[in-house]
Image (cartoon, rainbow, N blue to C red):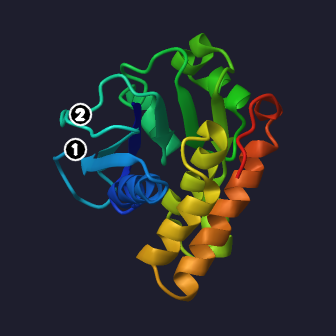
Amino acid sequence: MFQTRIHGRGGQGVVTAAELLASAAFDAGRHAQAFPSFGSERTGAPVVAYCRIDDHPIRTREPIAEPNAIIVQDATLLWSGEPLAGVPADAYLLINSTKSAAELAAEHPALAERGGSRIVTVGATEIALRRIGRPVPNAVLLGGFAALTGIVPLSGVQEALRNRFPGVVGVSNAEAAAEAFEVVLAEPEMRVHAPAD
């Protein structure tokens, strides 16, 4: 089972990201489960959502304590320590930032302790503003997630986006996801284990 935890702030589409990821996995013939962490739902308040993907039915329902991957939609949340709690050393970390993973690690001791392995950054907010016209990084980061993990194909993410957001909005989101996919594949460490799509 592949377990993903998504951290962001209210208004960034955190729960929608988990649902879209589950939809992409389901459409690829896998079992998937997406659900939010309950708490304050104010715009700007920290929000956590979860997604599990497996080839077999998923019976567990509890929050994900030790994820295989985390997506951090707002890098300022790293300072709270919550996104990295329980994250194993071999987990994938995808962070919305215009800074490189090395630059973030220099500022954040917990990232520095992990080394550069499996940590990738994408300027998702900037891509979203340019492609979609709104500072909502969720769709962009799902494209990066597809490249980083290979758990879902980019085509599945794009289809989920077009189904959720019909018309030009869906097309723009799918294009933003594709751009992030290419950004992540361009990372030096990705050349070793680049997923196919």
Disc 2 marks which residue?
63
Residue 117 in the image: above or below residue 43: above
SS assignment at label 2: loop
Q: Are marks 2 and 1 in contact (CB under 8 Å)?
A: yes
Residue at screen point 82% across, 43% down: 186
- Of the residues tagged 2 and 1, which is closer to the observer? 2
Q: Name the kind of residue labelled 1 in the image.
A: Ser
Residue 37, numbered circle: 1
Q: Residue furthest top?
A: 113
Q: Name the kind of residue labelled 2 in the image.
A: Pro
Whole-angstrom CA distance, mark 2 to mark 1, is 7 Å
Residue nearest the viewer, comparing 179 with 56: 56
Residue at screen point 48% across, 41% down: 72
Residue 155, x across and y down, in percent: 62, 62
Describe residue 120's horizontal placement relative to residue 17 as left or right.
right
Counting residues from the start of the chain, the first of labels 2 and 1 encountered is 1
Residue 106, x across and y down, in percent: 67, 21
SS assignment at label 1: loop
